[in-house]
Image (cartoon, helix red, strand yellow):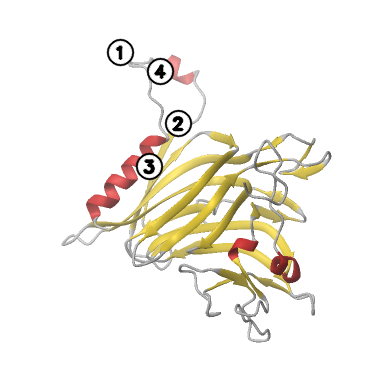
Amino acid sequence: MNYTAYGYAALTVFSMGISAVAQAELTPMSDETMGEVTGQAFMEIENFNNVTGSTLDYTRMTLGMEVETRVNIDDVTLGDIDSGADLAASRVALGHIARADGVEYNGQNYLADESVPFEAARPYLELAEDPDPTNPRLVGFRMGFEQARGSVSSVTSSFSGNIGLKITDDSTGVVYDGALFDANSQATDYRATHIGINDAAVTTDCATGTNCAPLSHAQSLIVGQDNNGATDFTSDFFIGFQAEDVPWQSPAGANVINAGKGVYLNLPTSMTVNMSDLATGLPRLRTHRTDLGTNLF
């Protein structure tokens, strides 16, 4: 994708999140009046070029707002080129509906039929630019939240990015970081179709389902950061669009995530699951007002 296309895409996406405001004449405020005002800017713009391992210049525009939402989307396809898609999923949902009384999500107890929202705060749009004076260009942009937690449900057939899921080996009890694979059991973060355990001490075969399962088996995941069994907010939930590999720094400054060329979704979760449960399929949360049970539609 060239500079112009990236620029238009970034402008279009960002403008969607900005509401129209009333027009009024601007008049200067006295020092006394300004001294009585406290608060935080609706939009913050930060420029920096100190990301470890990067020579790029970054500009991050952050909106001082909070969001609670529950939304369903029929189909999502991104990066559809070269006989495949970087991200392809159907029946996508943010947030869900509690099935029973007393179930805890996001640090709260919910009654049956109550909506459990996806929570997000301080959404941002970030640009990464090559500062080469002979050929300055936009090489990527991403959208994310400084804080996010809640359920993400989908039936995913192709995934580019990272899913921060921990998987327990049933036979040994050892907990591994989940890894993405293609159909040939090769570990990859580009157009992956499976998820499982990637370790020299473990046999993994996606064709036979040995320590590997289709991504469609992970139908509901809890985005967030684990805190002794509770789900705290994560600052690393984002989707990026790159013309080349781009290292993105966490808004909190703690992590640098290397996103590959194309569409890249970073999906950090607070979940640890048994490989046997993943092999048979993680249950989908209730994402429709009419409970469809195990059916999708």
Q: Which residue is at 49% across, 34% downward? A: 64
Query: Is 77 rendered above or below residue 272?
Result: above
Q: Is residue 288 visible?
A: yes
- Image: 25 above or below 259: above
Left-right relation of 272 to 80: right
**Could you tell me which secondary element the residue under label 1 belongs to?**
loop
Q: Work out whether mark 4 precedes mark 2 in sequence or the reverse, and give the earlier one.
A: 4
Identify which amino acid the numbered label 4 is placed on.
Asp
> Dot 1, how many residues are within 10 Å of its Cα: few (below 14), some (14-19), or many (20+)?
few
Q: Amino acid at mark 3?
A: Val
Q: Quadrant of residue 211?
A: bottom right
Amino acid carrying label 1: it is Glu
Residue corresponding to mark 2:
42
- Residue at the spot of label 1: 25
Asked if the residue at tag 3 contacts the one at tag 1, i.e. Cβ–Cβ closer than 8 Å, the answer is: no
Q: Position of residue 67 (x, y in %)?
A: 56, 35
Q: What is the distance, in whole Å, between disc 4 and disc 3 at their CAs?
A: 37 Å
First in sequence, mark 1 or 3: give its number. 3
Q: Which mark is residue 31?
A: 4
Which of pointers 3 and 2 lies earlier in the amino acid sequence?
3
Question: Badge 2 local density, few (<14 within 10 Å), some, or many (20+)?
Answer: few
- Give yes or no for contact between labels 4 and 1 (Cβ–Cβ under 8 Å): no
* Secondary structure category for the residue under label 3: helix
Q: Are marks 2 and 1 in contact (CB under 8 Å)?
A: no
**C-alpha gap between disc 2 and disc 1:** 19 Å
Which residue occupies the foreground of this view, 239 or 128? 239
Give the residue number, with chain letter if any, for mark 3.
Answer: 13
Q: Residues within 10 Å of mark 3 (few under 14, many from 20)?
A: few
